[in-house]
Image (cartoon, rainbow, N blue to C red):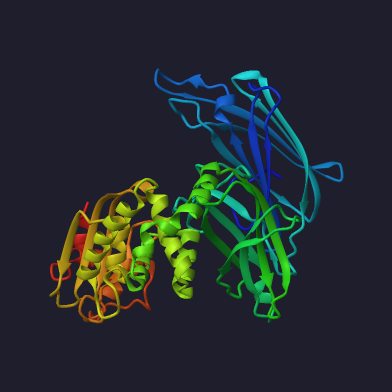
Amino acid sequence: MKALVNLSIGLLFFIFIIYPPSINALSISITSAQFQYNDSKYIEFYIQVIGKTATFIDVDTNSMKATIDFTFLLKKNGKIVNFDKFSLQSPISYFKKDFIGLRRFKVDTGTYSIEINAIDANNQENKFRYKNDLDIDLDSRKVCISGIRLLADVKKSEDINNPFVKNGFYMEPALSYFLPQKVHSLGIYFEVYNLDKYLDNYKVNIQLKKGYKGSQSNIIFTNKINVKKIELLPALTSIDINGLPSGNYHLQANIIDSNNKIIYSRFVNFQRSNPISESITKIKKKTYKNSFVKKIPKDSLYYSLRALLPIVTGEQSISLNKVLSDKIDRKSRFFLWNFWVDKNNAHPEMEYKEYMKYARAVDITFRSQLGYGFETDRGIIYLRYGKPSQVISQTSEPNAPPYEIWFYDAIEQGQQRNIKFLFYMPSLAHNDYELLHSNCRGEKNNPTWIYKLYSKRTDANEKNNKQGQLSQYYQMLKNSYDNNAVRIWEELK
């Protein structure tokens, strides 16, 4: 059977990094993963060629590329059950850079051996060879978990031709279990199967633990996964590892029954190198007690912590919510001090005061009857991305509540350009604007936003919407001069 190249569902994750004896020899990282879909099981192989060990040839005076020829042999009980031969080319570049690829095979339950041979097409003496055994053990009759994938990069994408895009996300695998200091955030993806076949109300969580699996380990944190009774439950999350000290760790995904008993789990080991974090942690323990946070009144302390909610992410967000919930003075002051030391180790108090001037101004500008201004949707976006390049405000359109469209020429997060946010005020309460739609990655995206905004129109019917009807309705409003939002949205570039 010919190997397929499109990324599909669920994975049991194995990773192998091979560093040849010679520093000049071809170096390749291979990741394999098993998953299941519609009672079929698959195994994928992720490939990363270390660019500096490949031979690049000139394409023109400013660019070059490399080509690696691969042969894959998949065996079961000593017999070849799958074979593939292909070439992997690097992107054309002006320097030697790493490049990745993917291969996929259909398999059954059991133990397989994989043999991989690679030859540098531009230097036949430059070779790579790998052999290993793999167990395929997912069971379509039971609740089970795919492997835990560690991800180097995650972003929204509709590119269905990209083999690393799945469920609307580009997910680039982290092809090493060694996470250096420069890695600040770790993406995690796994899938839970067959929850629809059982009456028990299962829970799913993922835990970060100190030490490798099998050793005496402490739980550093637990993250709950929202559960639905469906055949395939995808789980995509990330954790902030910026302050995680050097050492061995493992991530463990668990299925827990109604008696709080773990009935199924998967894990993945990884190693963290973060020497600066260790030294900063030692300094922090000695110095925070005499820092500026000790002088902050208690009411101002919690105001300052709430003002951080729009800008914290990942594990830091989980920690902040716990600090606000527990309201333990010592932990609250340490969190605030720790946050601003991470931002500006030399002048944390100055950094804190500058931000709070900004946050107080946002609070005054966007405060509504529901809470602080920096907790409203507009306040959150303002603190998260800064002042918009342009704001279009409409307060008297006959068919719509008051609304605003914010436009950013560029935002630093993700290096995105031409970013827009649409806020509207369906309640008509003072300053009570809600975020309705945005084209910013990670923010609320609502393809049928025009039905919500123009709900007063008799022809605005979201329930009967089909894609073709939505497109026609969108075009009609675009050419309308008493319903301006679509035209404004289109013209802001």
Q: Residue drawn at (26%, 65%), measured in percent from left and top? A: 422
In this view, the residue farthest toward the front is: 290
x and y percent of residue 431 in the render? 21, 75
x and y percent of residue 48 in the render? 59, 37
Res. 171 visible in picture: no
- Nearest the viewer among 206 and 428 is 206
Res. 492 visible in picture: yes
Q: Residue drawn at (25%, 60%), measured in percent from left and top? A: 358
x and y percent of residue 39 in the render? 70, 63
Q: Quadrant of residue 398?
A: bottom left
Q: Quadrant of residue 400?
A: bottom left
Q: Is residue 7 left or right of residue 379?
A: right
Q: Quadrant of residue 142?
A: bottom right
- Nearest the viewer among 452 and 460 is 452
Q: Is residue 178 left or right of residue 473?
A: right
Q: Is residue 18 left or right of residue 451?
A: right
Q: Residue drawn at (48%, 55%), measured in percent from left and top? A: 169
x and y percent of residue 63 in the render? 43, 23
Q: How many marks?
A: 0
Q: Is residue 326 left or right of residue 380?
A: right
Q: Residue drawn at (56%, 38%), measured in percent from left and top? A: 100
